[in-house]
């Protein structure tokens, strides 16, 4: 059976991974910096602090421990872009995040992204499940995360096949464990 | 390639170019009848289809504004997308998986066979299996259906092998790789299937039959067929006597044109066809065209559908090869000991990672969902397709306020499951879950129906004018030179994928139209 190696390290992440080990996302000015300085993104409109919260929310919504934060951050960059064009949307994001953080502080004595346990963060998300912000992030993630071609190999999905002659001689019927 | 004048009142105008319209156009042209197909979408073919689910969705889907209501989950999860169909030359035969099944004889007589099912508006078709047999044979030959005409069946992929192993464990007897209109060997100038996958995205190799790049070019080669793309019909017009005499359509720039016609055939799929008839109201036809019975738009059917996905300890790579790679037919029988009338088919199905995320369990999030997604390459899956009960209240109506880009009222699709549909779905989920567990599934997921691909009914065929919209040839009861040529004429849905029946009905209708024309009846 032609089995794919899902753990192959891409050249890019190999080159960028340093020796510095950070515990979480670093916020610096308008910039959010990923663990091990593996990536960074600028969030001038929504601000780095809110962006880091949204990135954590994104991970908690569709948690895949083998995906780096940059894949989640990519979706939040879309939120940043929309906030830059749409004032009402920007204020909705700020307002809803305040609500989430105040609920987090009330119940777990910390801002959302600073709550250590996933179960507790998810508890906060659950009680905000119907909010327009959560629905927006969830909807964007369904397409933005799973339609990112870079993540496909990590799920064992090969994508386009016509240019490779299909699967006729590449394992369409090679199952060997039945 | 023919080009007819817009003022040519001798042409037959067909609205839509899918399984019904595309095949009808080919058949009429081959009989020497001047025919114009007006297709709302653009023209695409194997050269520009893309192996990319969302990109393809944007390229060929029908994305015009629609609204939904009723208790179906599609209305909650995909409120603006009641159906997943195509706006392009070839219509939904670009998107279809290729399953080509004949109705079972009893399914032509649902009212007689199933009796008086409470809450259902069942009718018998005014035609039967014997009448349709030669037309099915003609359709299978045209489409190159495997398992017919000496055409070998396709090889089964990994998804099929898991499915077949489970079928065996369950004691099922009738399972195989299907009757598929996908070339298993070169035929009719097209090559054999290369097991590319992406059957829903338009077949890149052209091995799968589609009216868009198989039937319509055959019609065009006669010099009698013009297929005018990017031409969305907004209204059918009639003369003082009440006969239709032309259609109004918008081109891709929104510019309005009029095409005169001797005969008009509506084949825009079961949402657009009734919408067009309703939008063609006039002083003479105040409730819409061909609607003296009040039946236009009613009895919308979408098949009882659902999916079951199963995750195994070891990999499957179910997306490799044909999207629909096999079928179990044992449950398609009518056997009320299971607690419902009618039956269902089990057919393998695979989605790419992007669509799996969107459809596996719409709206869900968190670890449980993510864990299922992480099992993607260890998944096998199947689609359940069974007969749903026609209900007059399941219907396509015109939205009172919302208008489309051409200023026409958009359709609202109202649908609620019948109790029989729910019982059948639960039975099918139970059986298919047991099937996958019998071969070692560690997790199974019961996935709700996708936006409708099998849109049926809404202009149904009936023996009596008061019960339906068209007679047994798809000719409207009210207007003799107005026909319905798509799945909207289905009286009941049967358990089988509808395309083969739509094609067979179109071929039969072509013969009737030609005869009526030569005898000057129309």
Image (cartoon, rainbow, N blue to C red):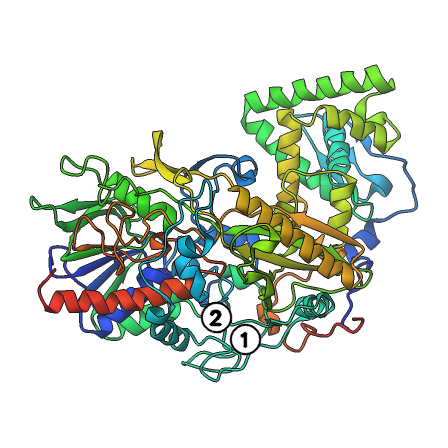
Report if residue B258 is visible in the image: no
Residue drawn 62% across and 69% down? Answer: B321
Which chain is mark 2 on?
B
Mark 2 = which residue? B208
- Disc 1 to disc 2: CB gap under 8 Å: yes
Which chain is mark 1 on?
B
What separation in Å lies between label 1 and label 2 (alpha carbons)?
Answer: 7 Å
Q: Position of residue A139 (x, y in %)?
A: 62, 37
Report if residue B416 is visible in the image: yes
Q: Position of residue A174 (x, y in %)?
A: 73, 74
Q: Position of residue B381 (x, y in %)?
A: 66, 59
Where residue A144 is drawn, which disc sits there? none
In this picture, residue B506 sits left or right of residue B78: left
Mark 1 = which residue? B193
Residue drawn 80% across and 20% down? Answer: A104
How many badges with numbers are in the image?
A: 2
**Neighbours of disc 2 within 10 Å: few (<14), some (14-19), many (20+):** many
**Vertical placement of B500 versus B296: above or below?**
below
Q: Earlier in the sequence, mark 1 or mark 2?
A: 1
């Amino acid at each position: 059976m032609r089995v794919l190696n899902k753990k192959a390290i891409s050249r890019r992440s190999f080159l960028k991974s340093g020796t510095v080990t950070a515990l979480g996302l670093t916020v610096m000015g308008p910039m959010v910096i990923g663990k091990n300085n593996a990536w960074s993104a600028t969030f001038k409109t929504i601000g780095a602090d809110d962006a880091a919260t949204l990135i954590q929310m994104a991970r908690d919504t569709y948690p895949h421990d083998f995906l780096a934060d940059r894949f989640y951050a990519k979706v939040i960059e879309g939120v940043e872009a929309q906030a830059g064009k749409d004032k009402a949307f920007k204020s909705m994001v700020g307002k809803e995040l305040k609500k989430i953080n105040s609920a987090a502080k009330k119940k777990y004595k910390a801002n959302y992204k600073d709550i250590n346990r996933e179960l507790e963060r998810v508890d906060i998300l659950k009680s905000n499940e119907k909010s327009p912000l959560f629905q927006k992030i969830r909807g964007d993630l369904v397409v933005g995360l799973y339609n990112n071609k870079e993540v496909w190999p990590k799920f064992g999905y090969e994508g386009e096949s016509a240019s490779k002659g299909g699967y006729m001689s590449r394992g369409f019927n090679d199952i060997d464990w039945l | 390639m023919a080009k007819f004048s817009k003022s040519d009142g001798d042409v037959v105008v067909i609205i839509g170019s899918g399984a019904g319209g595309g095949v009808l156009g080919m058949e009429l042209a081959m009989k020497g009848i001047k025919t114009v197909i007006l297709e709302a979408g653009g023209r695409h073919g194997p050269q520009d289809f893309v192996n990319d689910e969302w990109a393809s969705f944007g390229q060929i889907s029908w994305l015009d504004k629609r609204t939904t209501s009723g208790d179906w989950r599609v209305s909650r999860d995909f409120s603006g997308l009641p159906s997943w169909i195509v706006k392009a030359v070839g219509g939904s035969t670009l998107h279809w998986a290729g399953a080509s099944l004949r109705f079972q004889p009893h399914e032509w007589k649902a009212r007689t066979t199933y009796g008086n099912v409470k809450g259902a508006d069942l009718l018998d078709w005014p035609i039967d299996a014997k009448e349709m047999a030669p037309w099915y044979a003609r359709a299978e030959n045209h489409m190159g259906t495997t398992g017919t005409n000496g055409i070998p069946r396709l090889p089964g992929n990994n998804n099929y092998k898991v499915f077949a192993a489970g079928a065996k464990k369950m004691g099922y007897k009738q399972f195989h790789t299907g009757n598929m209109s996908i070339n298993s060997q070169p035929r009719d100038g097209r090559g054999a299937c290369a097991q590319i996958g992406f059957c829903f995205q338009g077949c890149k190799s052209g091995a799968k039959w589609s009216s868009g790049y198989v039937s319509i070019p055959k019609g065009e080669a006669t010099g009698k067929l013009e297929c005018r793309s990017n031409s969305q019909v907004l209204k059918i017009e009639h003369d003082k006597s009440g006969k239709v005499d032309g259609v109004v359509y918008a081109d891709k720039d929104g510019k309005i044109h009029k095409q005169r016609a001797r005969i008009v055939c509506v084949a825009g799929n079961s949402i657009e066809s009734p919408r067009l008839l309703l939008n063609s109201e006039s002083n003479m036809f105040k409730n819409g065209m061909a609607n003296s019975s009040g039946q236009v738009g009613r009895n919308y059917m979408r098949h009882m559908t659902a999916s079951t996905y199963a995750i195994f300890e070891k990999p499957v790579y179910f997306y490799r090869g044909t999207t629909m790679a096999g079928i179990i037919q044992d449950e398609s029988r009518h056997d009320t000991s299971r607690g419902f009338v009618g039956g269902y088919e089990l057919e393998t199905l695979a989605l790419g990672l992007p669509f799996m995320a969107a459809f596996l369990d719409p709206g869900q999030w968190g670890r449980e969902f993510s864990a299922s997604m992480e099992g993607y390459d260890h998944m096998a899956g199947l689609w359940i397709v069974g007969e749903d009960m026609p209900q007059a209240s399941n219907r396509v109506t015109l939205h009172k306020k919302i208008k489309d880009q051409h200023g026409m009222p958009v359709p609202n699709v109202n649908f609620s499951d019948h109790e029989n549909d729910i019982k059948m779905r639960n039975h099918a989920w139970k059986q298919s879950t047991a099937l996958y567990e019998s071969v070692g599934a560690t997790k199974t997921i019961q996935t709700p129906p996708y936006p409708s691909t099998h849109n049926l009914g809404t202009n149904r065929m009936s023996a009596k004018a008061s019960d339906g919209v068209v007679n047994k040839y798809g000719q409207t009861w009210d207007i003799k030179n107005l026909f319905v040529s798509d799945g909207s004429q289905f009286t009941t849905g049967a358990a089988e994928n509808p395309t083969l029946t739509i094609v067979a009905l179109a071929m039969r209708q072509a013969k009737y139209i030609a005869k009526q024309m030569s005898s000057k009846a129309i």
